[in-house]
Amino acid sequence: MRELEKPQTLVCGRFRLKLGGRPLIMAILNLTPDSFSDGGELLTPQAAYRRALALQAAGADLLDVGAESTRPHAVPVSATEEKRRLLPALKRLTRLSLPISVDTTKPEVAAAALAAGASLINDVTALADPAMRRLAARTRVPVVLMHSRGIPAQVGSTVPASDDIVAEVCASLRQSAKRAQAAGVRHDRILLDPGIGFGKRPEENLLLLRGLRRLKRLGYPVLVGPSRKAFLAAVLGPLTPKQRVWGTAAACALATEHGADILRVHDAGEMRMVANVARAITAGRLPAARGRRA
Ligand code: HH2
């Protein structure tokens, strides 16, 4: 298998996202009461829109909007409740000139979000539901296939250690991609995500971030989401999720060095700067627009 080297364009509805240069910043917008780091902050469409404007101004390339928390032991919500949280905000968010990804595992919710203007599906179960695969194939939107050990709401720190977590995640995501393609999802619409924090031990998250290049060799763009996650506190000591921003910055810088195409983050402005500098150092030159002398 060959690492994705050529620039690739991801078509998200009326938007075109260019991959292969500096990593894109996917800014997280949680419309939940109980997300692990920012639950309850965006409970009205107005609040969500205000935050999205700020994220756009800070340099976000796309938004990832979710209405059900994936944190361990979160209370599952029905599709009806998820849509109630999501759709009014989504209607406003489509006024922005940013592509919107919907973070859901339910085909019914994804279909409603796509109809309301979202143009990418982010599924932490890697399209486990055949109806989700059919929807993705029919609507021709890009999909994020994320690896998780166990059902997201149930995963905790008691998972067995893996002999080679990178190999395990690569093998599983290769299967998920194959399954999606067999259902009609085109190769160039698939992104892979190792699922930082999802059923992994803290040190396994470190190994996954260090081993991103092995995942890239499967030939798909790679998205990674280390933002504010608990493995950072395992390194740094007890910190609240919002105090983990420097740890997130280190993870984003190294993920950039190891070839991440998209960084899924809460602190979009900060990580935009981190990714741009990390990329400039990796490339050994200034970004194109700034490289020229006046
Ligand atoms: N992490 C979270 C949720 N969705 N999707 C992808 N593709 N990758 C991730 O790493 C990922 C994800 C957890 O973060 P957050 O959305 O802030 O928390 P919560 O699920 O509690 O809302």
Image: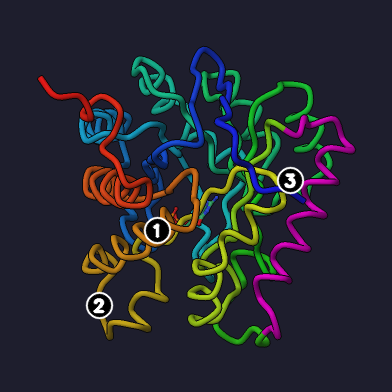
| Amino acid type for the residue under numbered disc 3 | Leu
Q: How is the image coloured?
A: rainbow
Farthest right residue? Answer: 182
Q: CA distance from mark 2 to mark 1?
A: 18 Å
Tell me if 224 is positioned left or right of 148 in this view. Answer: left
Residue under numbered circle 2: 239
Residue under numbered circle 1: 34
**Residue 282 in the image, given as x and y percentages of width and height:** 37, 51
Q: Which residues are magenta?
A: 162-187
* Few, some or many residues within 10 Å of mark 2 (<14, 14–19, 20+): some
Kindly identify the residue that appears in the image at 75 percent across and 34 percent down: 187
| Amino acid type for the residue under numbered disc 1 | Asp
The reply to whether the C-beta atoms of the residues labelled 2 and 1 are less than 8 Å apart is: no
Nearer mark to the viewer, of 3 and 1 = 3
> Which image quadrant for residue 188?
top right
| Amino acid type for the residue under numbered disc 2 | Leu
Q: Which mark is residue 127?
A: 3
- In the image, is the residue at mark 1 within 8 Å of ligand 1 by its beta carbon? yes
**Residue 115 in the image, given as x and y percentages of width and height:** 60, 18
